[in-house]
Image (tube, rainbow, N blue to C red):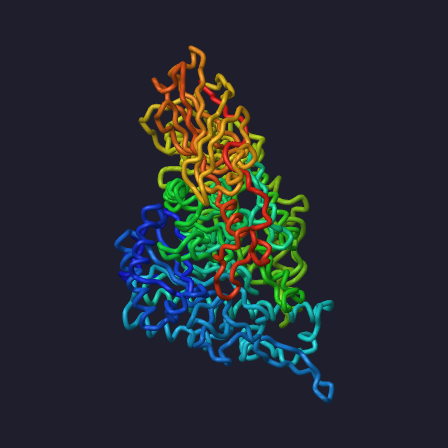
């Protein structure tokens, strides 16, 4: 694929730093505020912003700028130029709100559905009706019908205003963006019958009795419904996704595309996009000490996020050879004003394990610098802008992400196995959502897919330590063999293909598998061989050909386990140790990113399925790097010692050539631990709505309960904890760490007047360097900053007006009108024992 110089220039933009969704409320932006915001974001360590115009702020109507008006285009151009000045990139949604649609979409080009009825003679009739869906959360000037994504003419018409804009001046936006498919009720298009006949070879109009059904029972019914679903998928791929990607490339830009939620094979849609984008929506109860999940989050309603969900986008990227895999990150992670950085880092770490390497925060509401707290806000987000309570510490998270993504973006996939995704098999039924089958982020884990043989094998492969990617029929059919390995269209190699138990499978896919097997690629049918081919046309003839082909394959009733061991498919033991990881390939060896989100592992030996002449450990949080000793235990397996506390992460890099750097042993496991006890002086330093009086305490607990000043329960800001303590003679000058325990929410630690560092994520440990710092008599100062929840609680109790937004205005995580006046005080400060550990 050839890209313009503008696209090539975009490659110099820092994609290792995190980017963020940037909601322009009412597009009420001005040049001075834009410049100040962009400078702040650059200073905080952002790599770029993604502009999404949405509904406006009440009282600011005179500042609204209609979408795509000359003034709006001027502001877009100015933003891109200013962003470049600060080293930031800019992406943009190709519309406002979501999904794609606008005032330019005519009723003919708007989303359609089919409805079945009987006419006066009792004959079945299929009516094409508009869904009448309007753009959700639209900005001024962006209101209108939602686009018919299934109609190529409608899609090309949708591009016309943007053709006019970018052909006049190709503003240097890096990428266009398409949000998750939330086109409600759309299951038809004007020329569907014609397209169906071209693609499937027979007339659907002659089978309306099947389209009138709510369930499929006979072979004919199942097969016709499968053909209907496959046609929807083909239309979304060929008439929407590919043209959208081509339109972006036409102007030297990339396409970031969220394919989930669509009634299509999402692996194919992701694979046809320059940057497949997933979504980490919601929260989960990580088994990390002192981690808390927002009690108001409802997993039954919103689903349970995880690496399995992200793997659909990353698999497509790996198979198709894409450099970046992005993710909408921290959407509804917790209720407003209650999310802390220690809740964000675990989902970022799990995202990396899931194959994500281009984080997009969800997100940053545009807010004028002079807007009073809490500023302009977006309803469905974790707020990462300057009004956020963690803004001061955010550069620390951003720096951590940059260091991780710098490594992850410059590696290649290193998975041995492809797991076939049998969506064609599932299509042989009537879908539950408007008669379609959709895969969205809310139901991937809680819905049926994870409980199918496909989902169970994916879970088993993960637990057994095998690395794998998902693959579609189309992607398999385009694969080739090369020296006993499968080579995908994107140039990625795999050694085995696993097919879960299923009934229907395309003949063309089995033909490809036969060729691959003859070339030495391991093909494993887990459970049993497929029963028949997919689809309706001439299926009896195709069944006979399939039966002959299947004679060349063996079904493995007990799954893949024994055959993998015989074929030496690489197996890691990290999952059995309670660790999660991703293994990547570098030019010089392998790179492992390992996280500990359980409480079973602390310090132990681990095995890595790689060869090595040298091994390096890199801690991306503390930015420490050292070569470590290792032991070769077999031809392609080494053993190392690893210390990794719950909540921590680490990179292990192995080299296939000698490295001269001397190895270092880890700190001694013999250590001395003592609680820091005594009378703590607590002084409130800075915050709102007012600064409470200080107090003393011998027991650490929330300042909302310990302080006698009633304003402490409303305080949002920073308090300093001060204590004098002594150590034993043999501890003086030793290295060690402070274990702060349960911190709400971040802490700057000073020892004898010297700042040791900021603890902002779990575990809340701050290292003490060896030398003269730790003395026999010591002064410890810990400055703790809490959430803004108590402050907003005060404002709502006092009736201070700040919720002043159009459309949905401002709702809580349960989608009820937001009101914090009834909240209990949120615990703040140091909530438990602080310990000193020396070695």
Identify which residue is drawn at 60% across, 52% down. Answer: 303
Foreground residue among 766 and 423: 766
Q: Quadrant of the N terminus?
A: bottom left
Pinpoint residue 202: horizontal percent, then vertical percent: 60, 77
- From what the image shows, is residue 783 above or below residue 15? above
Identify which residue is drawn at 45% across, 18% down. Answer: 725
Q: Quadrant of the C terminus?
A: top left
* Residue 522 makes an appearance in the image: no
Judged from this view, the residue extending furthest toward the bottom is: 121
* Residue 27 makes an appearance in the image: yes
The mark total stands at 0
Foreground residue among 126 and 561: 126
Pinpoint residue 412: horizontal percent, then vertical percent: 41, 46
Q: Please tell me in which quadrant of the rendered image residue 369 appears.
A: bottom left
Pinpoint residue 653: horizontal percent, then vertical percent: 40, 35
Foreground residue among 414 and 829: 829
Identify which residue is drawn at 39% across, 40% down. Answer: 396
Pinpoint residue 498: horizontal percent, then vertical percent: 58, 49
- From what the image shows, is residue 383 above or below residue 703? below
């Amino acid at each position: 694929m050839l890209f313009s110089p503008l696209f090539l220039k975009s490659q110099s933009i820092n994609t290792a730093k995190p980017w963020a969704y940037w909601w322009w409320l009412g597009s009420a932006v001005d040049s001075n505020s834009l410049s100040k915001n962009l400078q702040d974001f650059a200073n905080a360590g952002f790599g770029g912003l993604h502009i999404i115009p949405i509904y406006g702020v009440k009282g600011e109507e005179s500042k609204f700028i209609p979408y795509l008006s000359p003034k709006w285009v001027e502001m877009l151009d100015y933003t891109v130029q200013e962003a470049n000045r600060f080293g930031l990139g800019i992406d943009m949604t190709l519309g406002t709100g979501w999904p794609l649609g606008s005032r330019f979409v005519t009723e003919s080009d708007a989303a359609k559905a089919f409805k079945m009825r009987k006419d006066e003679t009792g004959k079945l009739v299929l009516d094409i009706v508009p869904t009448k869906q309007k753009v959700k959360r639209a900005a001024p000037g962006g209101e209108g019908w939602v686009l018919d994504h299934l109609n190529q003419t409608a899609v090309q018409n949708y591009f016309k205003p943007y053709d006019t804009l970018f052909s006049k001046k190709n503003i240097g936006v890096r990428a266009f963006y398409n949000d998750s498919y939330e086109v409600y009720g759309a299951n038809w298009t004007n020329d569907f019958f014609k397209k169906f006949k071209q693609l499937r070879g027979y007339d659907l109009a002659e089978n309306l009795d099947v389209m009138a059904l709510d369930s499929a029972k006979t072979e004919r019914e199942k097969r016709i419904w499968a053909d209907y679903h496959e046609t929807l998928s083909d239309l979304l791929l060929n008439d929407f996704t590919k043209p959208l990607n081509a339109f972006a490339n036409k102007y030297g830009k990339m396409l970031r595309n969220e394919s989930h939620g669509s009634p299509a094979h999402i692996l194919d849609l992701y694979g046809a996009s320059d940057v497949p984008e997933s979504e980490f929506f919601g929260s989960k109860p990580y088994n990390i000490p002192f981690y808390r999940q927002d009690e108001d989050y409802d997993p039954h309603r919103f689903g349970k996020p995880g690496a399995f969900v992200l793997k659909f986008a990353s698999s497509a990227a790996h198979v198709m050879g894409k450099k970046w895999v992005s993710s909408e990150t921290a959407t509804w992670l917790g209720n407003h004003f209650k999310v802390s950085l220690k809740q964000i880092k675990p989902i970022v770490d799990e995202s990396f394990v899931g194959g994500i390497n281009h984080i997009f925060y969800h997100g940053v509401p545009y807010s004028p610098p002079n807007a009073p707290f809490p500023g302009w806000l977006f309803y469905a987000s974790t707020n990462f802008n300057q009004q956020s309570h963690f803004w001061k510490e955010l550069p620390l998270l951003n720096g951590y992400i940059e260091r991780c993504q710098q490594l992850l973006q410059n590696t290649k996939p290193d998975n041995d196995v492809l797991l076939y995704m049998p969506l064609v098999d599932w299509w042989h039924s009537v879908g539950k959502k408007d008669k379609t089958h959709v895969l969205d982020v809310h139901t991937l884990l809680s819905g049926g897919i994870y409980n199918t043989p496909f989902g169970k094998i994916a879970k088993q492969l993960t637990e057994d330590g095998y690395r794998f990617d998902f693959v579609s029929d189309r992607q398999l059919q385009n694969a080739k063999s090369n020296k006993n390995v499968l080579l995908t269209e994107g140039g990625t190699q795999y050694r085995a293909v696993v097919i879960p138990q299923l009934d229907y499978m395309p003949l063309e896919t089995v033909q490809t598998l036969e060729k691959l097997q003859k070339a030495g690629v391991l093909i494993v049918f887990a459970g049993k061989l497929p029963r028949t081919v997919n689809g309706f046309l001439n299926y009896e003839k195709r069944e006979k050909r399939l039966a002959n082909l299947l004679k060349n394959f063996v079904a493995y009733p007990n799954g893949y386990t024994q055959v993998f061991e015989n074929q030496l498919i690489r197996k890691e033991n990290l999952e059995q140790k309670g660790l999660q990881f991703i293994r990547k390939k570098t030019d010089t060896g392998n790179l492992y990113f390992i996280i500990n989100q359980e409480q079973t592992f602390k310090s132990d030996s681990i095995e890595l399925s790689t060869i090595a002449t040298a091994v390096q450990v890199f801690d991306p949080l503390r930015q420490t790097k050292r070569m470590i000793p290792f032991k070769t235990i077999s031809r392609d397996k080494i053993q190392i010692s690893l210390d990794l506390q719950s909540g921590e992460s680490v990179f292990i890099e192995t080299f296939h050539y000698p490295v001269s750097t001397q190895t270092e042993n880890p700190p001694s496991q013999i250590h001395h631990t003592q609680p820091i006890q005594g009378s703590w002086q607590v002084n409130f330093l800075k915050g709102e709505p007012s600064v409470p009086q200080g107090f003393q305490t011998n027991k650490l607990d929330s300042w909302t309960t310990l302080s006698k000043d009633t304003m402490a329960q409303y305080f949002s800001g920073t308090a300093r904890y001060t204590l004098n303590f002594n150590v034993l003679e043999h501890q003086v000058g030793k290295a060690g760490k402070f274990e702060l325990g349960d911190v709400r929410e971040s802490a700057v630690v000073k020892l004898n007047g010297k700042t040791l560092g900021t603890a902002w994520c779990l575990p809340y440990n701050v290292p003490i360097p060896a030398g003269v710092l730790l003395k026999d008599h010591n002064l410890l100062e810990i400055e703790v900053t809490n959430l803004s929840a108590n402050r907003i609680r005060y404002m709502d109790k006092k009736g201070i007006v700040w919720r002043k937004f159009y459309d949905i205005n401002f709702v809580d995580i349960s989608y009820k009108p937001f009101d914090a006046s009834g909240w209990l005080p949120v615990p703040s400060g140091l909530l438990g024992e602080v310990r000193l550990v020396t070695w």
